[in-house]
Amino acid sequence: MRLVAAARDVGFVSFGKYGQYVVTIVTVPLIARLLGPEGLGLVAIGMSSYFIGTVLVDLGITQFLAATVPSGDVRQIRGNYLAIRTSIFGTIVGALLLGLVLGAGPVVTMILLGLSTGGAWSMSEDWVLIGQGRFGASMAYQAVGRIAYLVLLIVVLPRYPHAAVALICLLLSSIVTVGLTWRDSLKRFGRPARPRHVLTTVRMGVPVLSSRLLVTSFGIGSATIYSSVLDAASLGLFSAGDRLVRAIQGQLDAIGLALLPRMARVAGVDRFWKRAVLSMLVCVGIACVATAIVWVSAPTLIRLIFGDGFEDAIPLLRLEAFILPAAALTSFATTAVLSVRQDTTGVLIGAVVGTCVAAAWFYVAVRTHSVWALAYGTLCSEVATALWFIIRMRFLNVRDRNARHGETDRVVADGEVVVP
């Protein structure tokens, strides 16, 4: 029954939290055929910035805060978190308005619009639902917003075929999901408490935010960084394969997020690490199968979804498919293991490792202006980060066991004194 419940929750999270990837598979053919490689490249820049915007506004600590819901002061946490998110989101929107007034170019406009759209989605209270283990409600609220985006895109984009329209549709659809999650949290917990000791939350968020931004910069946010050295058409070809891979990765990410509340409730060091290792191996095994399927079916997928104008994306997709096992391991480690152990330092160091590798490949891109530098940089960064998290989890496992054995030794010593 526990296995069935866990599988059910993974399904809920896959459809809800990462539903944008499913919607993406439906809408990308429409965008690709209406806008072409260059237009798809501009959309890729905006969507890349979207993910950066989500991290900027929520500080990347939604999983950490969700783990505190069962035992923490939820109203106070919500009040502190709301004050932080509102301040950051207001700043991003102000930058977008300023850019529009000053007549920023299309690339800068898409970056600012993407940041604002991602920030809007991060204003939701979905993390509270995840902390309660209410994945069904989370799925329902997310699904309503994604369906609204799909409808808006199908109706509006053919009439106004512009890259910015795709982001505006996503921005408008966020209102639905954000409103529903806030309605739910207000009903269950009342109004958020007045912000108090906000700096405590900020201090916890700084290392996580730094690490998430670094990881995003060489992962799903890489198009924003590389837009300074690659043209929109090249980014469009890369995005064609990247979208498919990220869609699959999103479903694998759901495993760690669905297991987060369960891992947080596991009692005992040995039991926790046994469950963590087993779950991680299953996740990576599924990712390996997905990699093989994508590699074999890459030509069919590209021609079917994007059309003949994107055939140059086939070898890029095949290369990117190899990031799935590494990305799955990294996602599970940060979401279901390090978040529960509150190891913000390990998360930050992993991000730094990946960013250093990505920086080397970005230098190659500056010299060559080749999209292959972006593809190889993404793969190498993901693999390096995954290797670090294997090392880090091993370190935490050994440390926890030594601490438990040390505590047992002290109890025995005390017993020998009290009972000769």
Image (cartoon, rainbow, N blue to C red):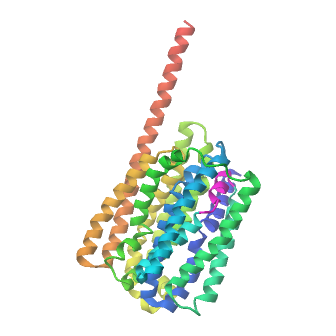
Q: Tell me which segment is drawn in magenta.
A: 123-133
Give the percent coordinates (x, y) of residue 281: 50, 54
Looking at the image, residue 97 sits to the left or right of residue 366; the answer is: right
Question: Residue extending furthest top?
Answer: 420
The verdict on residue 129 being magenta is yes
Quarter residue 138 falls in: bottom right
Q: Is residue 244 visible?
A: no
**Camera-nearest residue between 405 and 151:** 151
Left or right: 67 as drawn, with respect to 190: left
Question: Total number of numbered labels?
Answer: 0
Instruction: Name the one closer to the observer, 300 or 309.
Output: 309
Task: State the image coordinates of residue 105 (x, y, percent, origin top left).
Answer: 40, 83
* Residue 409 place in picture, x, y as percent: 49, 21
157 versus 345 height, above or below = below
Which residue ends up furthest to the right in the rendered image?
A: 187
Where's residue 65, x and y in %? Answer: 58, 50
User: Magenta region's main secondary structure?
Assistant: helix
Residue 2 appears in the rendering: yes
Magenta highlight on residue 50: no
The relative height of residue 349 versus residue 220 in the rendered view (above or below) is: above
User: Which quadrant would residue 111 be assigned to in this image?
Assistant: bottom left
Q: Residue furthest left?
A: 367
Quadrant (top left, top right, bottom left, bottom right) of the C terminus: top right
User: Residue at the location (43% across, 75% down)?
Assistant: 295
**Which residue is found at the position 66% from the left and 77% from the top?**
147
**Between 330 and 170, the one nearer to me in the picture:** 170
